[in-house]
Image (cartoon, rainbow, N blue to C red):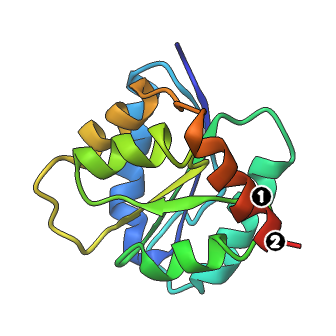
Amino acid sequence: MNKKIVLGTDHGGFELKERIKNHLEKSGHIIIDVGVYNEDSVDYPDVANKACNEYKSGNYDFGILFCGTAIGISMAANKIKGIRCAVIHDLFTAEMCKAHNNANFLAFGGRIEYNASVENMIDKFIETTYEGGRHEQRLNKITALEK
């Protein structure tokens, strides 16, 4: 099933974002790219804010953020109410952040050497279903922390 996905990056993740955008479009997904569109230096909190607010404007399945390490942009994203951004390292974390945490954003580092391809990690996330059940009370507690 095709997904509607918002992408955002700073300069450190630009090349990876372009590669992932191409992969997702070839797979038939609808992509909204909120930038950046070159490697000129920008501040990742601004990009996280823009992408997360675009996601919250409606009808997106999830979003993907990129920076040099994924750390800074995920920290910024997780400050925004309603965002659960997971830094992904491998196929296991790609699966679990959806199955147990129902993440609505993923973050990847353009300067990180991953053992699995980022494309495969995103595909794993897309094919995974949130389990709900015992995990729901934990998500409710995360949401309560936002108040």
Mark toward the viewer: 2 or 1: 2
Taking the image as shown, residue 31 lies to the left or right of residue 117, namely: right
Say few, some or many: other residues with alpha carbon within 10 Å of mark 1 (under 14 / 14 to 19 / 20 or more).
some
- Which one is earlier in the sequence, the residue at label 2 or at label 1? 1
Q: Position of residue 125 (x, y in %)?
A: 41, 37
Q: Is residue 32 above or below residue 25?
A: below
Residue 25 sits above or below residue 12 on the image? above
Work out which residue is located at the far top of the displayed protein and give it: 1
Q: CA distance from mark 2 to mark 1?
A: 8 Å
> Image quarter for residue 15?
bottom left
Residue 82 badge: 1
Q: Secondary structure at mark 2?
A: loop
Residue 46's disc is none
User: Depth check: 132 or 43 in front?
Assistant: 132
Q: Residues within 10 Å of mark 2 (few under 14, many from 20)?
A: few
**Mark 2 is on which residue type?**
Glu
Counting from the top left corner in percent of width and height, residue 106 is at 48, 54
Residue 90 screen position, x and y as percent: 23, 52
| Outermost residue to the left | 115
Secondary structure at badge 1 equals loop
Q: Horizontally, is 4 left or right of 38 in the view?
A: right
Left or right, 102 with respect to 81, comes to left
Q: Please name the residue shown 74% across and 53% down the image.
A: 140
Residue for badge 2 = 146
The amino acid pointed to by label 1 is: Gly
Between 23 and 79, the residue placed more toward the observer is: 79
| Residue at point 25%, 46% (across, down) | 92
At x 65%, y 71%, the residue is 78
Query: Could you say where residue 113 lies in the image, as x and y percent from the top left?
Result: 15, 67
Do the residues bearing badges 2 and 1 touch, measured as CB atoms within 8 Å? yes
Q: Quadrant of the C terminus?
A: bottom right
